Image (spheres, rainbow, N blue to C red):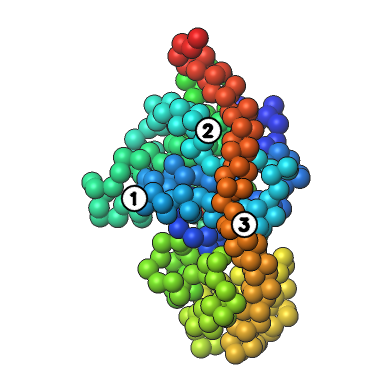
Amino acid sequence: MTDTTFTPRVFSGIKPSGGLTLGNYLGAIKRFVGMQGQMETIYCVVDMHAITVWQDPKELAHMTREVAAGYLAAGLDPSQSILFNQSQVAAHAELGWIFNCVARVGWMNRMTQFKDKAGSNAEKVSLGLYAYPSLMAADILLYHATHVPVGEDQKQHVELTRDIAAKFNHDYKVDFFPATEPVIEGPAMRIMNLRDGTKKMSKSGESDMERINMTDDADKIAKKFKKAKTDPEPLPETVEGLASRPEARNLVEIYAALDDTTPEAVIAQYPGAGWGTFKPALADLAVAKLSPISEEMARLMDDPAEIDRTLAAGADKARAIAEPILKQTYDIVGLLRG
Ligand code: TYM
């Protein structure tokens, strides 16, 4: 089975379960913008994924708009990309159910993100959290998406999507769903926590000092980089010298991703530099790159009705692609429809 018969199409999404972080920007949104115009691009605010853990309803609506504002402010253009929130296209949930019947419990049990999130509390988490990767497969396959730009933490879920597509095609003897490729490239695939370079920077980390939020102002950004944990050594002379220095490597990778360059080039620019030199340079770069985006996000958030209109218009376009694919899926499975 190959995916050569499928038109190249990008799908990706972000959960509105907290404010956007620098990890979401560098690992996802900035790359979404880079793919826009190269092929058809569909970007979703995956609100139904967010509710797999408790969300305050008002806060969920606010965060959904904020992620949409982040997309727009970073350069996603509704005339070039389809932008919408997942719950407006019911076909996601419908295909998700079919995939719940294709995916195996054993596959779900191997999902490391579920194990991390559920921890020792697995009996008490929602059933939705467990089934989450099968809804994610539905998000992608509902559009026959061939390319999925994500950060490193989502790789296993995209691989599961391929397994679900292959099993569906095999069970029903069709060549209907493509083998989607995860697109994981560049220096920012796993931005780490600023206080602990062995943990991922995430929306839900305990302390605000461990992440840069897309809504942070210049002073906060500078303060967070200044206080970022590092080892006492200066930067190395070559990139190999970062190998066993997770915090140093993280700051160099953030610099490289913000500046559209490579860690090698950053080290070549700052060989042997002390943190007193590098951290302020990184903070200045981050402020220069992020402030225009956060200012535009704030401006967009002043007119929530306009964001809602943009999402509704995007949902109409998404439905036009998704519904015929869902109908064909129903026919393949033998579910009657009028
Ligand atoms: P979410 O909302 O946790 O994260 C959204 C995107 O941001 C990336 N990301 C990071 N990249 C680098 N470093 C980090 N510290 C970092 N933190 C987050 C994530 O890898 C992701 O690309 N399950 C997904 C959402 C989803 C989805 C989809 C994605 C639902 N359906 C279909 C792609 C296609 C999630 O929870 O991402």
**Which residue position holds label 1?**
54
Q: Residue at x 63, y 37 (%)?
A: 313
Image position, residue 310 (x, y; %): 63, 43
**Residue 164 to residue 169: above or below:** below
Residue 64 pos. (x, y %): 50, 50
Q: Earlier in the sequence, mark 2 or mark 3?
A: 2
Callout 2: helix, strand or loop?
loop
What residue is pinned by disc 2?
Answer: 89
Task: Find out if the beta carbon at label 3 lies less than 8 Å from the nearest ligand 1 atom.
Answer: no
Report the disc number at residue 190. Answer: none
Q: What is the three-letter code of the residue carrying label 3?
A: Leu
Q: Residues within 10 Å of mark 2 (few under 14, many from 20)?
A: many
User: Which numbered circle lies on residue 300?
Assistant: 3
- Horizontal and vertical percent position of residue 12: 58, 45
Relative to 83, 326 lies left or right? left
Image height check: is 161 above or below 304?
Answer: above
What residue is at 23 percent from the left and 46 percent from the top?
123
